[in-house]
Image (cartoon, grey):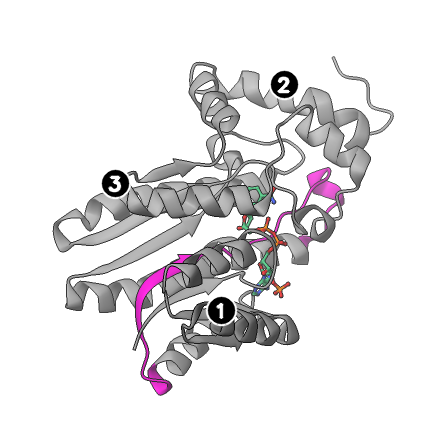
Amino acid sequence: MKVTLLTGASSGIGEAWADRLAAEKHNLVLVARSESKLKELSTTLSHKYGVSVQYIAIDLSQPQADLRIVEETEKRKLTVACLINNAGIGTAGDFTQLNLANELGMMQLNMMAVVSLTHHYLKQMRERNSGTIINVASMAAFMPAPFMAAYAASKAFVKSFTEALAEENRPFNIRIMLLCPGATETKFFETANINESDKKALLGKANIQTPDMVADEAMKGMKSQKIVVISGLTNRIGVKLGALLPNSVIAKFIAKGARSTFQKGYSYV
Ligand SMILES: NC(=O)c1ccc[n+]([C@@H]2O[C@H](COP(=O)([O-])OP(=O)(O)OC[C@H]3O[C@@H](n4cnc5c(N)ncnc54)[C@H](OP(=O)(O)O)[C@@H]3O)[C@@H](O)[C@H]2O)c1
């Protein structure tokens, strides 16, 4: 059976996206850690839309998680026709104050898991001469983000990796797309220990989207030929304007808003 494998499906953007995909008759394999949530969502979506919805509960920040997923899809005789690498987390703060193990765990999830799953399933897609891979980055992929330094760098990695693979695989009928959401109202901020005032400091007056809005734009993007899909008009304008400025200016601008929160007592010169 042909399936769409969607990571980070238990909440936020992934959960909203799973609903849209099931509505468009994708058979799904949902991946995340929260087994009870995945079980509940699988039952709801399969009843609501009459498609097959299975799940694999796994921690993608553990090395070898990719191998377990591949083994599992092979055991269940599933062909992954579409892979969506959406699972991801962020961290925020003065880099020296952040827990190194957490930073490395985030890099494992945001980058290594994406590379590993893409490698396994892209090889199979190349043999079939068909398939779709979508990786989720962020607006942070376009700029250095002081006080979210490693997170933004991990998403810049995903962006570069995905854009390169899109071109590399152009002759093989494989669609590769990068989705870049901007600030979206999900558990992301809670997981990153970003409270409401930190959020204000980091995002300023950024336009915050809902997961449903992002999922709708993702579905529209999947039907287009675009490689980079940025969710939200203000975000699209932001990226165009940002491209006119040197990164050092953008970094200063972001740091200016966030320094008083994350480096209390240090005056900004
Ligand atoms: N929200 C934003 O403002 C924003 C902006 C730009 C980009 N993004 C990106 O959008 C993507 C989705 O995030 P979201 O905003 O929807 O946040 P979310 O609601 O926190 O969803 C994150 C998803 O990833 C899963 N996940 C987290 N750690 C995992 C792990 N170790 N192993 C397996 N699954 C894991 C979570 O499930 P479990 O906890 O059940 O494992 C959840 O399903 C991420 O890549 C994020 O970087 C978000």
Quickly name the residue at label 1.
30
Q: Is tag 3's residue or tag 2's residue first in the polypeptide sequence?
A: 3
What amino acid does circle 1 point to? Leu
Please, what secondary structure does the residue beneath circle 2 have?
helix
Quadrant where the C terminus is found in the figure: top right
Q: Is tag 3's residue or tag 1's residue first in the polypeptide sequence?
A: 1
Q: CA distance from mark 3 to mark 1?
A: 25 Å
> Is residue 58 at all visible to an observer of this figure?
no
Residue appearing at x 39%, y 38% in the figure: 229
What amino acid does circle 3 point to? Gln
Residue 237: x, y in percent?
46, 21
The vertical placement of 87 against 223, above or below, is below
Residue appearing at x 64%, y 24% in the figure: 254
Residue 62: x, y in percent?
55, 70
Q: Which mark is residue 253?
A: 2
Residue appearing at x 53%, y 73% in the figure: 42
Q: Please tell me how crowded label 1 is: few (under 14), some (14-19), or many (20+) other residues with Cα within 10 Å.
A: many
Quickly name the residue at label 3.
225
What amino acid does circle 2 point to? Phe
Q: Please tell me how crowded label 3 is: few (under 14), some (14-19), or many (20+) other residues with Cα within 10 Å.
A: few
Extent of the magenta region = 74-100
